[in-house]
Image (tube, rainbow, N blue to C red):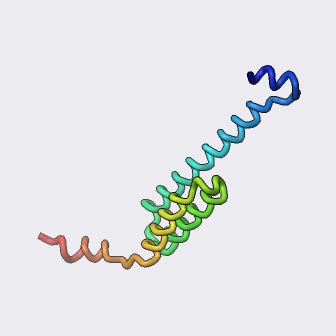
Amino acid sequence: MYFLINSFIGIPVLALFVGWALLIAIAIIAINVGAIFAAFKFKNMKIVGGILIACGVLLFALIQWFAIPALVLFVIAGIMALREKNTLSNLKGENLKP
């Protein structure tokens, strides 16, 4: 079918579609890896919250309606990170002593 369409039109339609789909898939993976990296490597929760919200917005801009669940989850995680107090360091220092 691909060769038949290509012979009529003269441009590789299927290759163009698959190429764009591959680029979008790579971008989605990069955004998700960036969000995971930000969540576990940065200590400043304000920056992490902003990055998570930005990742959700980028996913929504990239794949639109299919990214609504990811947008909601990234925004919730970003808001939780923005509201986070530095209680984990307090737990490590005082409450966990034997």
**Residue placed at 75% from the left, 24% from the top?**
2
**Residue placed at 52% from the left, 58% from the top?**
70
Q: Is residue 22 placed above or below 74 in the rendered structure?
A: above
Q: Residue furthest left?
A: 98
Number of numbered callouts drawn: 0
Q: Position of residue 14 (x, y in %)?
A: 74, 31
Task: Choose between 70 and 58: the one closer to the eye.
Answer: 70
Task: Choose between 27 and 41: the one closer to the eye.
Answer: 27
Q: Is residue 26 placed above or below 93 in the rendered structure?
A: above
Q: Position of residue 54 (x, y in %)?
A: 59, 65
From the viewer's perspective, tell me whether residue 29 is left or right of residue 3: left
Q: Position of residue 68 (x, y in %)?
A: 56, 59
From the viewer's perspective, tell me whether residue 55 is left or right of residue 7: left
Which quadrant of the figure contains the N terminus? top right
**Residue placed at 47% from the left, 56% from the top?**
36
Which quadrant of the figure contains the C terminus? bottom left
Q: Position of residue 63 (x, y in %)?
A: 64, 53
Task: Give the quadrant of residue 19.
Answer: top right
Q: Is residue 1 placed above or below 64 in the rendered structure?
A: above
**Residue placed at 66% from the left, 54% from the top?**
62
